[in-house]
Amino acid sequence: MISLALLAFVLSLVFTLWVRRVFRRTFSYSPDAPQRFHLGDVPRLGGLGLLAGWALGLAALPMLQWAGMAGNIDLDARLSRWLLMLLPAFAGGVMEDMTQRLTVRWRLLLTLSSGALAWFLLGVSVPRLGFEWIDGAWTHWPWLGIGFAVLAITGLPHAFNIIDGYNGLAGAVAMVVCLALAHVALQVGDRELAAMAIALAAATAGFLVWNYPRGLIFAGDAGAYLWGLLIATLSLLLVQRHPVVSPWFPMLLLIYPVWETLFSIYRKLWRGDSPGMADALHLHQLVYRRLVRSVLHEDEAKNMLKRNNRTAPYLWSFIVLTVVPAVLFWRYSGVLLGFCVLFAVSYVAAYVMLVRFKVPRVLQPPVSRQ
């Protein structure tokens, strides 16, 4: 596993640098885009480096095994299916990163196509919900599990795209989630899923070298879709293959991007706006405006890049609050559900506090005394 991780890391590191140099002054955000919180032209095709690191690292696994540097993991036939599943949504993400003209409807249709392919090629489904009183009825309608799985794979790429607003935010979430999935996969003896999760975590680490803190390249829609598709499919297969793993384990792992998406849809509909309309009112954007600008002294906050880099660590605390209990209680649905509810309540409370400018005292800037 270590050799696979190192190879995926190096491949992603090199290919991401190559993508940055080739597309350095092309395919950047328009100056008036609401999600733009950076200066200059930054390429958005980091997803190409991520895919190269993950796919080529796994493709080289037989060579590593031949050299005695990896255990017995068979991925040859399955890897092609995974790549075929990724094709519609990832290609759409690349097209959006290059043109910024792909409508929301087409992006949803392409991720839905990838979700349907995940069911057709990999057989993903949600066989249970983790509670005996409902699982008995759930098993009588297998199409519900298939539909729920396709919906999850369709939606998670867009959830990652929503939180991909500042250097190191979505990438750090994806990397930590993949490591948690790999840990539990190894606990239940599933080395295949563990290898795929570790390769994605390592490829993400290679990308983050260039993305955080300097922001030399962005993951773009293609990168967010890659994270969402792979993590959703890995999570579903882990629960499907191993009944001891609670279906609420991946839900708690991913509750931050999932709840961010659901809450964003709610507040846009409440205002009478389309859920697909981009805005600058997500939690990470409020943290940028309310906390980062106020905590930093004015002379320190003149550079937008520095403020951008200081935003992600505030949100990393959400990772700790979700990943740690998920890894500790990955068998127990009731406990995991409780932590999901706790996160949702905490998120709404934090959001309302930031909207009303009630910044916690511990995060307020020190009062200057003259």
Image (cartoon, rainbow, N blue to C red):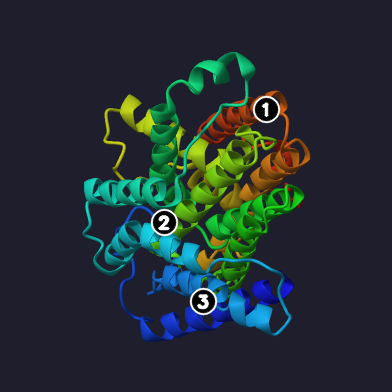
Q: Nearer the viewer, residue 132 or 177?
A: 132
* Mark 1 Cα-neighbour bin, 10 Å: few <14, some 14–19, many ≥20: some
Name the amino acid type tagged 3.
Answer: Leu
The residue under the point 71% across, 69% down is 1
Q: Quadrant of residue 279?
A: top left
Q: Nearer the viewer, residue 99 or 233?
A: 233
Q: Tags 2 and 1 in contact by the CB under 8 Å rule?
A: no
Left or right placement of residue 206 versus residue 124 in this view: right
Q: Where's residue 102, x and y in %?
A: 23, 57
The residue under the point 29% across, 43% down is 277
Q: Residue 333: which numbered mark, if any? A: 1
Left or right placement of residue 33 versus residue 282 in this view: left
Of labels 3 and 2, earlier in sequence is 3
Q: Residue furthest top?
A: 133
Residue picked out by circle 3? 56
Residue picked out by circle 2? 225
Name the amino acid type tagged 1.
Answer: Ser
Q: Does 77 appear above or below 275?
A: below
Q: Where's residue 257, x and y in %?
A: 52, 43
Name the amino acid type tagged 2.
Answer: Tyr
Of labels 3 and 1, earlier in sequence is 3
